[in-house]
Amino acid sequence: MTSPLFQLAAAQQSAPVTDWAARIAWVVGLLLFIALVYWLMREGWKWRGTLQGDLPELPAAPAEPGEPRLTLSGRYHGSTTAGQWLDRIVARGLGTRSRAELTLTDQGLHVVRPGAQDFFVPAAALRGARLDKGIAGKVLPEGGLLIVTWEHGNKQLDSGFRGDRAAEHPAWVEALNALGTAHSTTEHTETEGAR
């Protein structure tokens, strides 16, 4: 006859030994999968840039930009084809999100981006501005983004900005639309007079 203590000790078994080789294989496999996905995303980004290679170089600011009408600091969230908020433009560095300092003068809109390429939108290229809620990868509450529509090359672009003080956005929309309208009216009048 065996004691109940001996039976209890015999019934307990030790935990199975961890199979480290299988765990390491799973971790390595997962890391390789993540690296593959990252590489595919990067190649897609480069391919999109290649397809948009016909976009000309971005205009540089003039030496004498004139007196600033408005200034705004905030973030640049990217550019898309006008009217197509998911068709991101990545050529010429326009796909790079960054901090931004905007300055509006009579000659146009100067966008200074630390860590990314600055660009200038001449007043004649401005097509309008509006408040919206989203642009390629960034969605905010209604009216949270300042969208500037401008023409570059043969393409109309929407560029999205979010000011540090969103309350300033309506004044920017009004000023950009006024500047774009003034230049298109002047160009139209000069063309009509030349006939």
Image (spheres, helix red, strand yellow):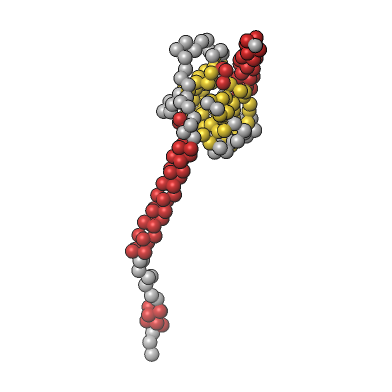
Q: Quadrant of the N terminus?
A: bottom left
**Image: 40 above or below 74:** below
Quarter of the image for residue 193 reads: top right
**Residue at 45% across, 12% down:** 63
The front one of 91 and 9 is: 91
Residue 166 shows in the view: no
User: Residue at the spot x=45%, y=24% of the render?
Assistant: 118
Q: Residue 146: where, in percent of width, then height?
A: 59, 27
Residue 191 versus residue 156: which sits nearer the camera? 191
Q: Is residue 124 above or below residue 134?
A: above
Find residue 59 and report its horizontal and vertical position in percent: 48, 21
Q: In the drawing, does residue 19 fall left or right of residue 55?
A: left
Q: In this view of the protein, can residue 3 be seen by the observer?
A: yes
Of residues 54 and 64, which is closer to you in this image? 54
In the rendered image, the residue lying farthest to the bottom is 1
- Residue 163 appears in which quarter of the rendering? top right
Q: Quadrant of the C terminus?
A: top right
Residue for point 56% across, 25% down: 151
Residue at position x 35%, y 66% from top?
19
Residue nearer the viewer, 26 or 35:
35
Q: Is residue 146 left or right of residue 8?
A: right
Q: What x and y, as percent, mark residue 117?
A: 44, 26
The residue furthest front is 195
Place of residue 155 in the rendered image (x, y in percent of width and height, measured from the top left):
56, 29
